[in-house]
Amino acid sequence: MRRSILDNSSGKGDDEEGINLTPMLDVVFIMLIFFIVTASFVKEAGIDVSRPHAKTAVSKKNANILIAISASDEIWMDRRRIDRNAVRGQIERMHAENPEGSVLILADRDSHGEALMAVMAAARQAKVNVSISARQD
Amino acid sequence: MAGRVDELSRMLAEGEEEAEIDLTPMLDVVFIMLIFFIVTASFLNEVGVDATRPPSVQTPPTDSKSIAIRIYSSGQIVIDGLSVDPRAVSAHITRRKAESPGATLAVLVGRGARTELVVGVIDAARDSGFRGIAIPVSELQE
């Protein structure tokens, strides 16, 4: 049988001499709850893009559907290259998993309007808020 | 197994203090969950500009003027029929905003327009105080 390192009730040692684990357990539980609550389960787009610059860019806290558009207008979601026509379905699926999230488009500054508008149209059809990622500096 | 049950029933019968629940398996699970959530925590902080128009209010705006900014594939920017240098877009929009503060703004994007230019125009408009910029996606410019 597998034994945990915390298992101090094994062997013939006295139970009464065991270390009091209660404070550690309190800390562990608080950490556990903290990480569960802050877990956002963001699905990374999968490619690195050079974002356009915008000085009015604001922090997007609940953007959890990331869609990247490369300089050659390829669309990436969830670490996969996907077809332009499949974007809407993918957004709807990811939105259903986490209804509070919104779409963030990570468009390369050398990508073109056609791909950008296609992704925006898909997000609007899926009735999800859209933002375009930018650099603030 | 049978011996363990006997031992437990004996302890219960005698009401001994040592009859404690073994927390070890639960602790194992808790630690594994803790490590999982620590590892999957991403803490990413993304910044961006809004591209969604807020839902329209029922009352019509006092000034129903609408400014259209067209970004063509060639990189040319046209504000209400007037060709504008990309660097002058911000100044232009600011002036138009001052002329008609209640105006709405639409950015019409061309098929081949570079994203840098599109975001630059949206940024300039936001910087001039425009909120709820319309970006029609159905009909694209050339």
Image: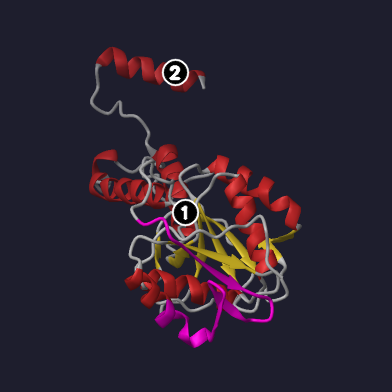
Visible residue check, residue A45: no
Visible residue check, residue A89: yes
Q: Residues within 10 Å of mark 1 (few under 14, many from 20)?
A: some
Q: Where is mark 2, residue-wise?
A: B5
- Name the residue nearer the viewer: B35 or B122: B122
Q: Is residue A125 left or right of residue B36?
A: right
Q: Residue A90: give x, y in percent of width and height.
A: 66, 48
Q: Is residue A20 left or right of residue A82?
A: left
Q: Where is mark 1, residue-wise?
A: B53
> In which quadrant is the C terminus of chain B drawn?
bottom right
Q: What chain letter is assigned to the residue under label 2? A: B
Q: Residue B106: give x, y in percent of width and height.
A: 51, 63
SS at badge 2: helix
Residue B76 in the magenta stretch? The answer is yes
In magenta, the rendered stretch is B63-92
The amino acid beneath tag 1 is: Arg
Q: Which mark is residue A108?
A: none
